[in-house]
Amino acid sequence: MRRADRLFQIAQYLRARKLTTARQLADWLAVSERTVYRDIRDLSLSGVPVEGEAGVGYRIKAGFDLQPLMFSPDEIDALVIGMRMVQAWGGPQLAASAVAALSKVTLALPREKRDFVEATAMYAPTFHLDPQHGQRLETIRQAISKHCKLQLEYADAGSTVSDRIVWPLGLYFFGGTWLIAAWCELRSDFRSFRLDRVQSLETLDTYPSHEGRRLADFVRAVQRSAGNRPASAGNQASR
């Protein structure tokens, strides 16, 4: 990557986040922290309003704007396949938003690069998906946003069906299926529920923000139980 491109990329990262450390920038750009510090100094000297300090993090003062970064063919491929995956697996509302977002990205590209969008030969087929899958994903997504409990009729790995009232905390995609990260009232513990094993669901009343039952607590619990390895899909919901 040319140094000018790297400076531009650093500015874009700093604009997009509340606070970014030199270590994060070094990892993303595959350079040393010393290089990042030098680049940030040079950005400041050139008039870019960088705020922050070493060891804490950096950001660009609100209101500062840059011309949009031109995408490389590989970056266009990454954007298109990401949007196509959201269209296939994200539910009807997210699918429509992905189409709209990709249209905006395409219009922002120079004319000579718009053909790259059509030429991306990476796809996420939808013909094998249950139509109810997307509707349920959207219901769960809205429940997470509004902090609403869900009542699930759920079949475990042995096809034993149980009724669960859960506090949905997040959704994650693992091994070809969506899983619900949740606090389970029946088990009084965190559980992961495979979306493809949910036979029915209903939105209930809201749940409180409870210390020890938040998404960050779920992540820590999974890391402890798995020895910092990714949790096996659905194994927490079989008990």
Image (cartoon, rainbow, N blue to C red):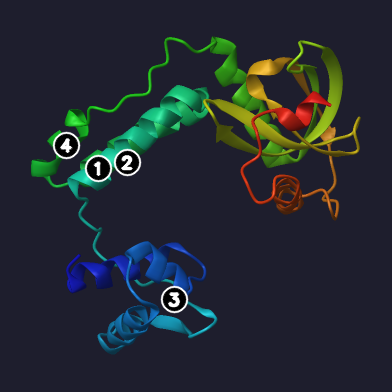
**Picture residue at 76% right of the left edge, 10% below the top:** 159
Are the residues tagged 1 and 2 within 8 Å (C-beta)? yes
Q: Choose mark 3 or mark 2, whichever is in front.
A: 3
Say if residue 12 shows up in the picture.
yes
Q: Residues within 10 Å of mark 3 (few under 14, many from 20)?
A: many
Asked which quadrant contains residue 68, the reply is bottom left
Q: Amino acid at mark 2?
A: Leu
Check contact, mark 1 vs mark 4: CB within 8 A: yes
Residue farthest along the left direction in this orientation: 112
- Under mark 1, the amino acid is Ile
Instruction: Identify the mark at residue 76; answer none if there is no mark.
Output: 1
Label 4 sits on residue: 116
Query: Which callout, 3 or 1, points to the residue nearer the camera?
Result: 3
Mark 1 or mark 4: whose residue is earlier in sequence: 1
- Please indicate, yes or no, whether residue 65 appears anywhere in the rendered image: no
The residue pinned by badge 2 equals 79
Measuring from the top left, give residue 37's x and y in whole percent.
37, 83
Whole-number angstrom distance, CA of label 1 to CA of label 2: 5 Å
Total count of labels: 4
Q: Residues within 10 Å of mark 1 (few under 14, many from 20)?
A: many
Image quadrant in which you'd find residue 99: top left
Position of residue 50 in the picture relative to residue 103 (left or right): right
Quadrant of the snapshot with the C terminus: top right
CA gap, disc 3 to disc 4?
33 Å
As shown in the figure, which amino acid type bears the numbered disc 3? Answer: Ala
- How far is the residue under mark 4 from the one under mark 2? 11 Å
Real-space Cα separation, disc 1 to disc 4, in angstroms: 7 Å
Give the distance between the C-alpha atoms of the residues marked 3 and 1, in whole angstroms.
26 Å
According to the image, label 3 marks what residue?
22
- Compare residues 84 and 65 and report the one nearer the observer: 84
In this image, 176 relative to 78: left or right?
A: right
